[in-house]
Amino acid sequence: MLVFVVPLKSEQVSKSWDKVSQLLERTLKSICNQTSSQFQVVVVCHEKPLVRFSHPAIEYVQMIYDIPEHPNKIVKGLTDKGRKVLRGIVEAKKYNPTHVMLVDADDCVSSKLASFVEKNPSCNGWYFSNGYKYLEGESCVYIKIKKFYTLSGTANILKYDILDIPDNPEYNRGYGYYKFYLDHQKIRDKMNAKNYPLKPLPFIGAIYTLGGGENMSGNEGILKFNWLNRRKLTDKIKNQFGLYPLS
């Protein structure tokens, strides 16, 4: 069983709650397009999003703490995200998962992930060495052929029982324990240091989306898109990742 944990930013800090909800709905449709039924989705949020799509594998967990205060908007957003990630990982336990995966609320994932995890239940996990970047509104994707996990938070699958989850998690403090999950670019090396080496995922597992206007990382408007890495957005890619243009 693979549990996808999706932390959702609050309406209080969103530029457009409608856009945040649209992006999440696409992400949820993408996740729930798995070829195996052995998965669960835990969305951790403050307010329930404006999502019409429903699926029996989706659970919404609402947080009750206040949005953290910090003069830096990125730090503020990541602190909130970290708390929600930790809560989602703790909540995942009740589904008896073999593995857990963090998915950013605007990304898309491969429909093959749950089936692949189901066939490899004893593996420590995987990092996504390559993946796609997608700029909203374009008719193409851009492939990143190495170190995709340094770019996107949707890029690691970890075995649940090797995670050092606190017995009494504290959500209402700084980065703390959950900074481990936010530093997605360091997870591979940290797991190696703990003698739990991860393997590269043997296929493209995610699409990192940009241009939606609600990205928290500060990457929007900064990343370059090399035409040499451009690939046509085919029906095969659309179907495998559940990617469609937002209205």
Image (tube, rainbow, N blue to C red):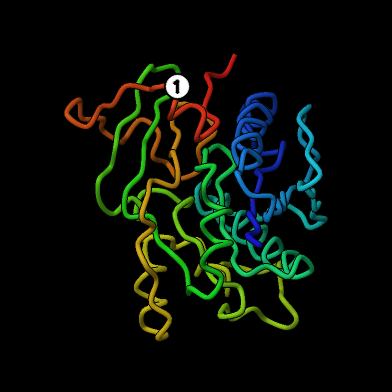
Q: Going by the image, does 112 lie left or right of 167?
A: left
The residue furthest front is 119
Q: Position of residue 236 (x, y in %)?
A: 44, 27
Q: Position of residue 120 (x, y in %)?
A: 51, 67
Q: Position of residue 58 (x, y in %)?
A: 76, 46
Q: Disc 1 designates what residue? A: 235
Label 1: which secondary element = helix
Q: Going by the image, does 86 lie left or right of 154?
A: right
Residue under the image location 50 percent in, 62 percent down: 157
Q: Does 200 appear above or below 9?
A: below
Q: Which quadrant does the N terminus fall into?
A: bottom right
Q: Does 136 appear above or below 192?
A: above
Q: Picture quarter containing residue 56? A: top right
Q: Going by the image, does 151 lie left or right of 160?
A: left
Q: Does 184 appear above or below 206?
A: below
Check disc 1 and give the amino acid type: Asp
Q: Does 109 appear above or below 171?
A: above
Q: Nearer the viewer, residue 158 or 6?
A: 158
Q: Which quadrant does the C terminus fall into?
A: top right
Residue under the image location 45 percent in, 34 percent down: 209
Q: Position of residue 6 (x, y in %)?
A: 64, 50
Q: Picture quarter containing residue 121? A: bottom right
The residue furthest bottom is 195
Badge 1: how crowded within 10 Å, few (<14), some, or many (20+)? few
Q: Nearer the viewer, residue 108 or 168?
A: 108
Q: Nearer the viewer, residue 155 or 184?
A: 155
Residue under the image location 36 percent in, 38 percent down: 132
